[in-house]
C-alpha cells in the first residue's frame, strides 16, 4: 500500500498538443440541501463539473479532485456564494494544469406541497424540474437558474368558435321574439352549453433567471410562484369535484395563445428577477405539433 502508484496524467505528455475548453465529469449523484423562506429539504441532484485545460502538453486533469470538491457541495445549504466558492476551489486545485475557468451544472426536482383550490385540508405534491448552470471564467462568476412549470392553456380562438356554435343553436331553438323565462334558459344551458367546447392542453413554461453571488438564496420557490401566478392556471395535485370546477373557471377566465402566456410570464418576471428568459410550449390537442414562443 506504500508503493508509489503511477500517474500518467503527470508523467506522460498529450499525444496531440491541443488545448481543451472543458474537461470533467457528468451525471454525478449528489445530495444537496435547499433552504429558502418557507422551504428546507434535502434533495437528490445530478451534477456536472468541468475545468478548462489550456495547457496543450498536459495529458489530463485530476478528476478525483473535482469529485471531492463537488462532494462537499452538499454539506451546507446551497447558495450562490457556496457555488462560487466550489468553482474557485476547482480552479485552485488545477493550477498545475493552468486552469482558469470552471463550471458546475446541477439538475434536480424541487418537490413542493400544493393545496387544492377550494377544498380545505386537501393537498398534494408537485415536482418542478430545476437546472442550475454556474461558471467562473477568468474571475467572472455567472449563475442561471432554470425551472419548468406546467399549466393549462385554453385557446381563445377555439373558445370564440365554440361560443358561436352555442349561440347559433340558441337562435335555432328559440326563433323569433318569443319571451323566455329564467328557468327555461337555465335548463337550455344545462343541456347545450357544452354543445361545443374549446380545446385546451397541458402546457410548459421553461424559465431561467440570473443570480449574483451576493444573493442570499436561489429564490427558486419565489420564481415558481411568480410564474404560476402569471399564467393563473397551474396544473393541480389532489382535487375533488369542487376543485375541478374552480379549475375550469380559471381556464375560462384565462384564455391564452402561446404568445399571451410568454408575455404574461416575462412581464411578471421583469421587475423581480435578473435577465429573465421565457420559453413556453403548448402541447396542442388540436394539432400533432406544438405551439412555442420565446421572450428575452
Image (cartoon, rainbow, N blue to C red):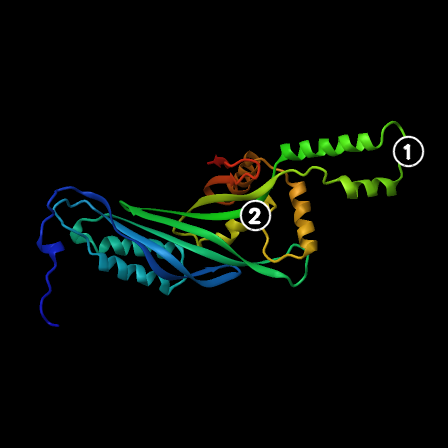
Q: Which residue is mark 2?
A: 228
Residue 162 picture location, percent across and down: 69, 34
Vertical placement of residue 175 versus 76, above or below? above
SS at mark 2 in the image? helix
Callout 2: 10 Å neighbours few (<14), some, many (20+)?
Answer: some
Residue 121, given in percent of the width and then of the height, sits at 65, 63
Circle number at residue 77: none
The residue that appears at 22% across and 56% down in the rendered structure is 63
Residue 176 occupies quadrant: top right
Percent position of residue 232, x then y: 61, 45
Q: Nearer the viewer, residue 271 or 241?
A: 241
Rendered view: 247 above or below 6: above
Find the residue positioned furthest to the top: 176
* 115 w.r.t. 289: above or below: below
Task: Name the one closer to the observer, 170 or 216.
Answer: 170
Give the residue drawn at x 12%, y 59%. 7
Q: Is residue 13 above or below residue 7?
A: above
**In this rendering, the label closer to the viewer, 2 or 1:** 1
Tally of numbered discs = 2
**Can you give x and y, in whole percent of width and height, for residue 251 in the image?**
64, 43
Looking at the image, residue 185 sits to the left or right of residue 144; the answer is: right
Other-residue count near label 1 (Cα within 10 Å), few / some / many at <14 / 14–19 / ≥20 = few
Quick one: which residue is furthest to the bottom in this view?
Answer: 1
Q: Which residue is mark 1?
A: 179
Q: Is tag 2's residue or tag 1's residue first in the polypeptide sequence? A: 1
Asked if residue 52 lies left or right of residue 271, the reply is left
Marks 2 and 1, how far apart at CA: 45 Å
Callout 2–callout 1 Cβ contact below 8 Å: no
SS under mark 1: loop
Quarter of the image for the N terminus: give it. Answer: bottom left
Amino acid at each position: 500500500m506504500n508503493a508509489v502508484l503511477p500517474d500518467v496524467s503527470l508523467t506522460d505528455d498529450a499525444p496531440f498538443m491541443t488545448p481543451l475548453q472543458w474537461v470533467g465529469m457528468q451525471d454525478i449523484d449528489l445530495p444537496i440541501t435547499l433552504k429558502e423562506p418557507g422551504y428546507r429539504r434535502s434533495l437528490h441532484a445530478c451534477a456536472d463539473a468541468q475545468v478548462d485545460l489550456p495547457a496543450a502538453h498536459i495529458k489530463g486533469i485530476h478528476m478525483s479532485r473535482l469529485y471531492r470538491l463537488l462532494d462537499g457541495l452538499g454539506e451546507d445549504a446551497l447558495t450562490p456564494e457556496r457555488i462560487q466558492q466550489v468553482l474557485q476551489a476547482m480552479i485552485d486545485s488545477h493550477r498545475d494544469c493552468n486552469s482558469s475557468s470552471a463550471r458546475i451544472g446541477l439538475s434536480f426536482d424541487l418537490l413542493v406541497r400544493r393545496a387544492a383550490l377550494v377544498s380545505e385540508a386537501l393537498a398534494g405534491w408537485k415536482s418542478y424540474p430545476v437546472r442550475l448552470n454556474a461558471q467562473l471564467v477568468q474571475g467572472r462568476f455567472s449563475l442561471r437558474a432554470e425551472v419548468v412549470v406546467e399549466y393549462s392553456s385554453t385557446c381563445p380562438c377555439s373558445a370564440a368558435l365554440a361560443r358561436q356554435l352555442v349561440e347559433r343553436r340558441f337562435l335555432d331553438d328559440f326563433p323569433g321574439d318569443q319571451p323566455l323565462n329564467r328557468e327555461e334558459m337555465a335548463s337550455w344551458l344545462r343541456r347545450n352549453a357544452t354543445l361545443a367546447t374549446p380545446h385546451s392542453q397541458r402546457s410548459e413554461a421553461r424559465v431561467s433567471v440570473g443570480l449574483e453571488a451576493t444573493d442570499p438564496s436561489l429564490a427558486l420557490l419565489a420564481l415558481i410562484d411568480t410564474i404560476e401566478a402569471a399564467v393563473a392556471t397551474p396544473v393541480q395535485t389532489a382535487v375533488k369535484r369542487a376543485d375541478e370546477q374552480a379549475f375550469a373557471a380559471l381556464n375560462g377566465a384565462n384564455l391564452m395563445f402561446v404568445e399571451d402566456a410568454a408575455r404574461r410570464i416575462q412581464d411578471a418576471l421583469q421587475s423581480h428577477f435578473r435577465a429573465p428568459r421565457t420559453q413556453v410550449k403548448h402541447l396542442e390537442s388540436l394539432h400533432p405539433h406544438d405551439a412555442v414562443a420565446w421572450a428575452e
